[in-house]
Amino acid sequence: MSYLRRQVVTAALTANAVRPVPGYWAGVPAMVGGWLTSELAPHLLTVTVADTVRELVRGGRNRATLGLAGASTVGLASMILESQRAKSYVDEALVDALGPDYRDRLTEKHTDIDLSTPLGQLALPFRLHDDEVEIVRDVVYDPSHGKRGLLDIYRPLQRATHGAPVLVQVHGGGWSMGSKDAQGIPLMLHMAARGWVCVAINYRLAPRDRFPAQLVDVKRAIAWVREQGPSYGMDPAFVAITGGSAGGHLAALAALTPDDPEYQPGFEDADTSVQAAVPHYGVYDFAGVTGRRRAEQLRDRFFGPRVLGKDPRTERGPFEKASPLLRVGPGAPAFFVIHGAHDSLVEVDQARAFVQALREVSHEPVAYAELPGTHHAFDVFPSIRSAHVVRGVDRFLRFTYDAWLDARSDRSREQKTG
């Protein structure tokens, strides 16, 4: 490929990352291109500059081509700066939800609160490994569904684990593909290295298994954590849940439907409540009640025929029951909702509506970080932006866990004195 063609491709990718190609059918390619370009902007910028220097050394002087390279360089540099600003967006969200002194309160109890950018990880973004973390793979939580009933456990390697808080990770993939080892790994490695036990689950996939099979499996995994977790060092009394895209939807819906017997066939009496939820770029409006065209298109062209196997024109109820936006109540746990403003698959309007609904009724903190210049799936591998998000989620989860411990201690003292 010639220098000219390389720069045309780079410029097109950069332009799409800055302003994603609109339209329903362009959603997936626009997302993939924008996601990779924006999260790998430092690497692409380095390659572009090196390629241009090489072209100049070889005598290339085409002004139009060099101008194209210059425009890409400016665009990529702006993306890097925008990624770095994710640190302030996340912190502002936590200040708003937890209070201006939340970091001071955290550092009183924790000496390893990390706000820096891990440059070593960013240089090799696809090296998803941590020497301080042990991974126990392919543990069976539901023997009736083969590999879809397996989970992986991430836990500290160098320290004895006993009574550790739990984070359940639910992968995305449009409810119809994906696996437990494809998403959320940077967050799980980070949390496990700091004493948490993380559980990444598989679940049944559509269209072979229609929704709510996926939600049933998430709840069965939570029930497994409550029953079997202590043998792996977990404290089953505190369970948080996270996930991205379809996993964000399932995490949010599981958090809002604790102990619902409709989604717990055969284990109706199990405790499937969670104490915190951190959905990333989730789908919150299955029924299209926000009136947004993209939400209605997803409902009619994807959710209906592929995920639920129902027609929203004649069977509206299942779509409404599958919408976290319509399941919000005062008993919701603490939430940290994270979404990219440039998401071309799931419009940010869904997250805004969901957060507003939560804040109107929830008795627990509701944090919301809307990240400018950010696309779908931004957290799959380490990047400048995802590193700041991971560290923000760490602060949110530890703050929530500390508050839960304090409340439990207060209840215990009241029982003793009462």
Image (cartoon, rainbow, N blue to C red):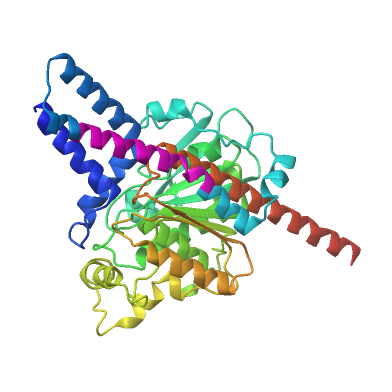
Give the image location of residue 59, x and y in percent.
12, 16
Q: Residue 284 is drawn in which quadrant?
A: bottom left
Q: Which residues are magenta?
A: 68-88
Depth check: give the residue in front, 154 or 73.
73
Magenta-colored stretch includes residue 69: yes
Above-or-below relation of 327 to 101: below
Give the image location of residue 69, x and y in percent.
21, 32
Give the image location of residue 7, x and y in percent.
16, 33
* 289 with respect to 21 (left or right): right
Above-or-below relation of 308 to 183: below
The C terminus lies in quadrant: bottom right
Q: Residue furthest bottom?
A: 314
Q: Residue at x 57, y 58 (%)?
A: 276
Give the image location of residue 367, x and y in percent.
55, 58
Q: Residue 3 is drawn in which quadrant?
A: top left
Depth check: give the residue in front, 281 or 90.
90
Q: Residue at x 36, y 56 (%)?
A: 245
Q: Residue at x 32, y 82 (%)?
A: 316
Q: Residue 407 is drawn in which quadrant?
A: bottom right
- In the rendered image, is residue 22 in sight? yes
